[in-house]
Image (cartoon, grey):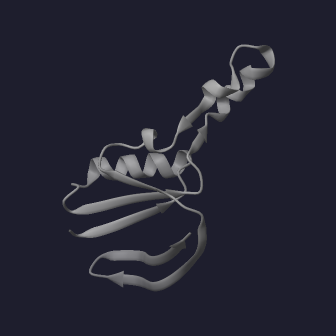
């Protein structure tokens, strides 16, 4: 197993990032985990239709893990702290890489 990428937050950006990374990297070379504090993803653009009776609120809630591609781990946890443990400005052509450690509860 090579790298382990942890994405904090399974909103639109976190989900799109995880799914794009899964397509780019083989599961044997890169493990991807997404962490978020709850399981409910609300499709916010649909909220515009609720006051007019064109959508029901319960139809706009989706399970976060179901939005992730196969091979992506999901962990429901509250992120307590994120700290930078290493910053590499330039090493062997990699520029601006940061290594973060997150503590979840």
Percent position (x, y) of residue 7? Answer: 47, 61
How many numbered dots are placed on residues in this image? Answer: 0
The residue positioned farthest toward the right in the image shown: 51
Q: Residue at x 54, y 61 (%)?
A: 77
Percent position (x, y) of residue 48? Answer: 74, 25
Please say if 67 is above or below 48. below
Q: Is residue 46 left or right of residue 14?
A: right
Q: Residue at x 71, y 28 (%)?
A: 47
Q: Is residue 29 left or right of residue 71?
A: left
Residue 45: quadrant of the picture: top right
Judging depth in this view, the residue of 6 and 56 nearest the camera is 56
Please say if 35 is above or below 81. above
- In the rendered image, the quadrant that contains the N terminus is bottom left
Percent position (x, y) of residue 16? Answer: 45, 46
Q: Residue at x 35, y 51 (%)?
A: 72
Please say if 40 is above or below 74. above
Q: Residue at x 42, y 64 (%)?
A: 6
Percent position (x, y) of residue 63? Answer: 51, 39
- In the rendered image, the quadrant that contains the C terminus is bottom right
């Amino acid at each position: 197993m090579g790298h382990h990428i942890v994405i904090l937050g399974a909103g639109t950006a976190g989900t799109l990032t995880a799914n794009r990374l899964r397509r780019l990297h083989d599961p044997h070379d890169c493990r991807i985990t997404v962490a978020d504090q709850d399981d409910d993803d609300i499709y916010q653009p649909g909220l515009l239709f609720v006051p007019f009776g064109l959508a029901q609120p319960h139809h706009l809630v989706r399970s976060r893990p179901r939005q992730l591609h196969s091979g992506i781990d999901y962990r429901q946890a509250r992120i307590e702290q994120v700290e930078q443990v290493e910053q590499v400005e330039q090493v062997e052509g990699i520029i601006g890489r940061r290594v973060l450690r997150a503590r979840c509860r």
